[in-house]
Amino acid sequence: MSTSFTLNGAAIILAAAPGDLLIDTLRSGCGLTGTRYGCGEEQCGACLVLVDGAPVHACGRETVTLDGRVVTTAEAVPGHIRDAFLAEQAGQCGYCLSGMLVAATALLARNPAPDRAAIVAVLDGNLCRCGSHPRIIAAILRAARGAA
Ligand code: FES
Ligand code: FES
C-alpha cells in the first residue's frame, strides 16, 4: 500500500501498512532523525511534527492517514526560530528540542506575538527533563521579536 504526502516541501510516495507509525517512517524510512522518540505514549512531545500546520504526535499517528497531507518536521523549522534557540542556549541535553521547535513554529504561525502565558500554555505538553523551559520560553519570545 502506498501513501503520498508532502514532506518538508517535497512530494513523496512511500510504502506503508496500517499500523506503521509516522515516527518510524520519518526516522527509518526517510532518514529524518530530528523527530525524537520519547515516551511513545503521546505524552512528552518529543516527537511533534506539523500536519497541515497543526502539531501532531508522530508516535501515535499512522503513516497511512497522511495521504494528501502536508507534513513538516523539525528539520524544516524556520531558521529564525532555530537561531533564537541557539542565541538563548535553550537546551541542555537537547532531547526535547525538536518537539519544542515544532511547537514554537505552530504557535508563532498562528500568534506571531505571543506573551509568556501563551507560550507556557502551548508548551504544557512538551516535557523537558533538564529544566530548560525558562530558556526555551525566552527563545520563543526572542523569535517573536525577530531578534536572532
Ligand atoms: S514520543 Fe511521542 S509524545 Fe512522547
Ligand atoms: S534540554 Fe534535555 S530534555 Fe530538554
Image: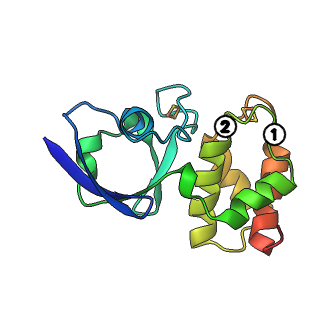
Residue 144, image x and y in percent? 75, 70
The tag earlier along the polypeptide, 2 or 1, is 2
The quarter of the picture where the N terminus appears is: top left
For badge 2, the amino acid type reads Cys
Q: Amino acid at mark 1?
A: Ser
At 19% from the left edge and 34% from the top edge, which residue is drawn?
Answer: 17
Q: State whether residue 65 is above or below residue 51.
A: above
Tell me the quarter of the picture where residue 23 sits: top left
Whole-angstrom CA distance, mark 2 to mark 1, is 9 Å
- Label 2 close to label 1 by CB (< 8 Å): yes
Number of numbered labels in the structure image:
2
Q: Residue at x 56, y 41 (%)?
A: 34
Residue at 86 percent of width and 47 percent of height: 89
Residue farthest to the left?
1
State the residue in front, 33 or 99. Answer: 33
For the residue carrying disc 1, how many other residues have a C-alpha within 10 Å: few (<14), some (14-19), or many (20+)? some
Q: Secondary structure at mark 2?
A: loop
Q: Is residue 111 left or right of residue 57?
A: right
Task: Indicate which disc residue 62 carries.
Answer: none
Residue 34, relative to residue 7: is it above or below?
above
> Taking 122 as reference, is 43 left or right?
left
Residue at position x 64%, y 57% from top? 104
> Which quadrant is home to the C terminus?
bottom right
Relative to the observer, which residue lies in front, 67 or 54?
A: 67
Q: Which residue is mark 2?
A: 96
Q: Is mark 2 within 8 Å of ligand 2?
A: yes
Mark 2 surroundings: few (<14), some (14-19) or many (≥20) residues within 10 A: many
**Mark drawn on residue 132:** 1
Q: Is mark 1 within 8 Å of ligand 2?
A: yes
What is the secondary structure assignment of the residue under circle 1?
loop
Q: Position of residue 2 (x, y in %)?
A: 16, 45
